[in-house]
Amino acid sequence: MENHSKNDAQHWIRQAIRDLSAYHVADASGMIKLDAMENPYVWPDELRQQWKELLVHTDVNRYPDPSGHQLKQQLRQAMNIPADMGILLGNGSDEIIQIIAMALSGTGRSLLSVDPGFVMYKMIASFCGLKYIGVPLRQEDFSLDLPAILQAMDQHQPAVIFLAYPNNPTGNLFDEQQVIKIIEAAPGLVVIDEAYAPFTDKTFMNRLGQYDNLVVMRTVSKMGLAGLRLGYLAGPRDWLNEFEKLRLPYNINTLTQLSAELAMKNHKIFDDQTTRIKQQRTLVNTRLAQMDALEVYPSDANFILIKTVSGQATRIHKELKEKGILIKLLDGASPMLKGCLRITIGTEEENQLLLSSLAKIL
């Protein structure tokens, strides 16, 4: 019988995977959690009661609806998805990114995005054997460097381009006309990732159908349903029908489908919460801008990127954590994010505690 050494995993696992670091989620036990762009507000009691009644009468001995037909109908209505566009459901938008990357991978193919951008684009590209091309944003304001992007597109002919709109982790909206020029010049698919759509009035959803290579990806996580793990992709059926072939059967469980359907029927509750978050975003941004030691970047998302002029990001992160407040340390994540921290907008009380604590630390 052959003896197996302890190094078997290192021998068999692809080098591209061994070179990666696992996605890290900080332990937030007992903390004021302002690090993960979550909606800080819970469901009101009347909606909880409806949810309870729904779950009590829901059986889970059978597999869920494989297509999520009812949920798609609710999403189409609540999110103004054009009637002639298809919808694909994912276990969070991460699964959708993976499905797209798997479908478009191949020898010599690449995935293009911007830097700094959502880290999962690069990670999933590596999972699926795509070369990742990250085009740096402009340092001064994190706007698109359109000439550089067009040059990279011409050089690498990417199979797919991902653009977050607004961008994560910078929070800004890219110039709409520049994005359109990218769509028009792209050799392959363009995915506009609108994870933070609830916090801005800008969208490419109404442009679906104008471009054969445009799809829009969203998640319900930021609007207050992060625990359900539900993302969706809207776009031309020619693309989505192919992606459906890679979607694992029953990927959206029964409880997620029913819970999300209920939430979509009560969409106004989440719209009201979003309005409160945007109001708090304005307040927090104003207060942060008054702190001399910080550079504050404009945001159309539910978080704010700040830069410590004195390069004290690690110290500030550590001292806030000691006070029970967890924000995201971005220093080291990208050369352009040196000295940066990202603050999720919390409740009124959480934001006030953050601001008072930060003022003392600085």
Image (cartoon, rainbow, N blue to C red):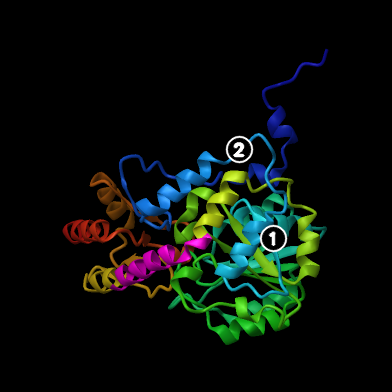
x, y percent for residue 218 = 58, 64
Is residue 50 among the parts visible in the rendering?
A: yes
In the rendered view, tell whether residue 139 sits above or below residue 347.
Answer: below
Q: CA distance from mark 2 to mark 1?
A: 24 Å
Please give the residue where the numbered disc 2 appears in the rendered image.
59
Residue, far left: 360
Confirm whether residue 43 shows in the render.
Answer: no
**The C terminus: image quadrant:** bottom left
Say above or below: 18 vs 135.
above
Nearer to me, 195 or 295: 195
Compare residues 90 and 71 and report the one nearer the observer: 71
Position of residue 346 relative to residue 85, above or below, is above
Frontmost residue, 129 versus 283: 283
Residue 22 lies in the magenta stretch: no
Coordinates of residue 170 in the picture (x, y in percent): 45, 68
Q: Which mark is residue 88?
A: 1
Q: How many marks?
A: 2
User: Pointers 2 and 1 in contact (CB under 8 A)?
Assistant: no
Residue at x-position 29% and y-position 47% = 321
